[in-house]
Image: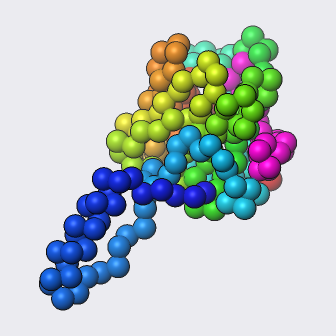
Amino acid sequence: MRRRVPAAIAALALGSAVLLAGCGSASAPSPPAGVDGLVIPTPDPDPADFVAAVDNPWLPLAPGSRWEYADSGSATPALVLTVVAGPQVAGVATTTLVRTHPDGTVERDLYAQDRDGNVWWFGREGEWRAGEDGAEAGLAMPATPRFGDGFRTAAAPGLAEVATVTAVGAEVTVPLATYDRTVELEVEDATGSRTEVYARGIGLVRTGEAGLVAYDAGG
């Protein structure tokens, strides 16, 4: 994924370089982290920037994986997620996350991971696809989420969704287990906001009031 350093960051880096030059030596600059330098949403994804598997530790999408969620005190699944192979979108091979809701509604979201480990949302089958009708892929999960990072999850007609990292490393208990290596996102769209919690190596463990009750890594 091509990176673009914001002007303010570039200016700060230049000023720092001038000051350090007067000191005689300087350590090498750190690479971008979090959402620094990413163009979000991305208007022209280059297939060469993407890899075949989605193995971001916060959002691992191995084919055959399955997650089941239930609201507190309910035995009825509130949501079931499964992973299957996806189509090519804008020349990029995607992975499909199938969301099955209690009423039988099924949504098929398309994701792809770039070489730096960032996961991008490339579309939802039957609704929008990156590269068609002005839609652009947005960021689903950074490779290195940081507290305070905010980003567009996609850009498509009728879709305006923004995610913000509101916590990193908080202990979270769901019916299946307690996790302390977590990332919490606050996601806002036209319908309101919801909280999503991701555990390292597992993926989504809480969405709104529904917590993870069963997980199969597939493979």
In this view, which residue lies farthest toward the bottom? 24
| Image coordinates for residue 198, horizontal then vertical, percent | 52, 41
Residue placed at 62% from the left, 43% from the top?
43
Q: Is residue 198 left or right of residue 134?
A: left
Whether residue 207 can be seen here? yes
Vertical relation: 50 (above or below) 110: below
Q: Is residue 40 left or right of residue 85?
A: left
Of residues 195 and 40, the one nearer the viewer is 40
Pick the quarter of the image with the N terminus.
bottom right
Q: Is residue 102 left or right of residue 172?
A: right
Looking at the rendering, the stretch of residues picked out in magenta corresponds to 79-101
| Image coordinates for residue 176, horizontal then vertical, percent | 58, 36
Q: Is residue 82 magenta?
A: yes
In this view, which residue lies farthest toward the top? 103
Residue placed at 35% from the left, 73% from the top?
29
Residue placed at 71% from the left, 37% from the top?
130
Tell me the chief SS of the magenta region.
Answer: strand
Residue placed at 21% from the left, 82% from the top?
21
Vertical relation: 178 (above or below) 104: below
Whether residue 117 can be seen here? no
Of residues 32 and 186, the one nearer the viewer is 32
| Image coordinates for residue 73, horizontal then vertical, percent | 55, 16
Vertical relation: 106 (above or below) 165: above
Q: Is residue 169 left or right of residue 188?
A: left
